[in-house]
Image: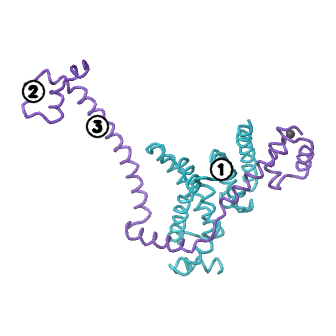
Amino acid sequence: MKCKQCHKELITWLEGSASQEKREAVEAHLAVCAGCREFAGYLRETLALAAAEVKVEEDPWFYTRVKARLTWKTQTTAPPARGKSSGQALAGLLQPAFFTLLLLLGIYGGIRLGGAPHRQNHPPLITEAPVPWMDEMNAEPLETFLMQ
Amino acid sequence: MHEKEMTDRLREGDEEAFRELVGEYQVRVMSLCLSMLHLREEAEDVAQEVFVEVYRSVGRFRGESRLSTWIYRIAVNKCLNQIRHRQRRKWFLLPGQLPEKQRQEEIAAPAGDLPSAEIERQQRLQRLWQAIDALPENQRKAFVLSRMEDLSYREVADIMGTTLPAVESLLQRARINLQQKLWAFYKKERS
Ligand SMILES: [Zn+2]
C-alpha cells in the first residue's frame, strides 16, 4: 500500500468500519510509515475533538423556551404555516428592495452633490434663502479653497 | 412511554406528553443541530423550532417510520434550511456578521488569554467544520448522522429516505473528501 491509498482508508480505519483486508493493509503500512502514522494521529484527535464539541448537557429550561415560542407563535401568526412562509417571502422581497432604494438614493445624492457647485454660476435659479450648507459653499467656493 | 401511546397523546394536544418528548429528544436534537450549524446560539434556536414543528405537525405523522426518525428528519431539514437562509443572508451582511466570523468570535470570546493548546484545539475544530461544510449536502447529512450522532447506517438511511448501499457510498465519499481537506490543512500546519 502506498501513502496516498493509506490516506484514503484512514478515516474508515479509525472508525473501525474497514474490511479485514483493508484494515490489515492499513496497519501494515502504518507500521513502516511514520508520516502516515502521524497524520492518522492528527485525524483521530481532530475527529475526537468534534465529537466532544457537540456533546450537550440536558438543559432544564429548554422545554420552557420551546413552550414560550409555541405560545408566542400561536398568538402572533394566525394560520401558522402560511404565516411564516409569507413572512419570509415578504422579507425576501423587502430586503433587496431596501438595498435598491439605498443604492438609488446614493446615486441621486451623488448627482445632486456633483451638480451643486455649478449652480453657483446661475444665481437666478436660487430664489429662496440659501440653505446653510449652500451658504457655506458660497462663502468659500471650491476654487478659493483649493488655491489655499 | 410507548411510541404509539406518545404520538396518540401528542395528537390530542397532551402537554405532559409533549414535555416528555422534549425531555427525551432535546439532547439528541440539539447535538445534531450543533453538528450541522456549529454555532451554539443558532443551534439552540433551530432546535427549539424543531420541537415547535413536531408539536404542530404530529397530526400528519402516520407512524410509518419511528418517531425518532421523523424527528431527526425534521431537524436535518430545519438545519439545511437555516444554512440556505444563512447563505442568502450573506449578501446583506457586514463582514463582522458572517456566521464564520461569529463562530470565530464565539470561540475567541471566552478566550482572552487562552493557552496555546486551547487555541490550537479551536483552530482544528474550525478546520474540521469547514471541511464538513464543504461536503455536498447528502454526504454531509450522512456523515453527521452516522459519525457525529452515532446512528446506525439503517437509521441514517431511514432518516434520509434512501437505501443502505446509498448511505455506505455517501459515507465512503464523505470520508475521502474530508481526509483530503484535512490533509491540506495538516500539511499547511506543518510547513
Ligand atoms: Zn505512508
Residue shown at 90%/52% (left/top)? A20
**What separation in Å lies between label 2 and label 1 (alpha carbons)?**
66 Å
SS at circle 2: helix
- Residue type, label 3: Leu
Chain painted purple: A
Chain painted cyan: B
Viewer can see residue B157 = no
Where does the C terminus of chain B fall, quadrant-wise? top right
Which of the two labelled residues, at mark 3 and mark 2, occupies the earlier sequence position?
3
Residue shown at 71%/45% (left/top)? B178
Around disc 2, counting alpha carbons within 10 Å, would you say few (fewer than 14), some (14 to 19), or many (20 or more)? few
Q: Quadrant of residue B60?
A: bottom right
Residues marked 3 and 1, same chain = no
**What separation in Å lies between label 3 and label 1 (alpha carbons)?**
45 Å
- Give B189 or B183, whichever is nearer the viewer: B189
SS at circle 3: helix
Q: Which residue is mark 3?
A: A105
Judge depth for marks 2 and 1 and give the one in front: 1
- Give B131 or A142, whichever is nearer the viewer: A142
Residue B84, x across and y down, in percent: 52, 49
Report ligand 1 position as a quadrant.
Answer: top right
**What separation in Å lies between label 3 and label 2 (alpha carbons)?**
24 Å
The label on residue B119 is 1
Judge depth for marks 3 and 1 and give the one in front: 1
B191 on left or right of A120:
right
Residue shown at 53%/73% (left/top)? A61
Q: Chain of mark 3?
A: A
The label on residue A125 is 2
The label on residue B150 is none
Q: Is residue A80 above or below residue B175?
A: below
